[in-house]
Amino acid sequence: MIRWPALAACVVLSAAPPAALLPETVVQKQVEAYNAHDLNAFAACYAQDIEFRTMAGAVNPEKGLAALKKGYGELFKAYPTLRVKILKRITQGAFVIDQEQAEGMGPNPITVTAIYEVSEGKIVRVWFIEG
């Protein structure tokens, strides 16, 4: 015999997270903030202890929101026409993989692949593949 309170608890526990916390939603918000050069909205998408990594596993020694704001603030000032467009996006679980094309840093666009790991509505780690 199924007890209704137990069934209701199972339904609640298996419900999808709110759209605002979905990894793809968080990553898209940071793309939009990046393109608007809105440093505060951009930083709000990241965890306090955000780490940027290479595919070889090296962690950028400058991590956390203060380093993110400093680095991206300088980037936005140096390249006022900087914009990124998403060429391809794959989402799986907590990960969003974007192939991005940045324009506004020189005569030719730059293509980068970024792998974002999202936890509790914040980006906690980013890996970049360049080349």
Image (cartoon, helix red, strand yellow):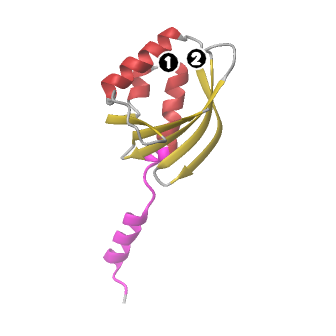
Residue found farthest to the bottom: 1
What segment carries the magenta color?
A: 2-23
Q: Which mark is residue 82?
A: 2
Q: CA distance from mark 2 to mark 1?
A: 8 Å
Seen from this angle, which residue lies furthest right?
Answer: 108
Viewport quadrant of the C terminus: top right
Q: What secondary structure is the stretch in magenta mostly built from?
A: helix
In the rendered view, tell whether residue 105 sits above or below residue 65: above
Q: Position of residue 17 (x, y in %)?
A: 43, 53
The kind of residue on which mark 2 rests is Leu
Residue depicted at 39% across the width and 43% down the height = 121
Q: Quadrant of the N terminus?
A: bottom left
Residue 90, magenta (yes or no): no
Secondary structure beneath label 2: loop
In this rendering, the answer to whether 88 lies above or below 6 is: above
Determine whether the residue tagged by mark 1 lies in a helix, strand or loop.
loop
Circle 2/circle 1 CB separation < 8 Å? yes
The one of 20 and 102 positioned closer to us in this rendering: 102
* Image location (x, y in percent) of residue 35: 55, 22
Residue designated by label 1: 37
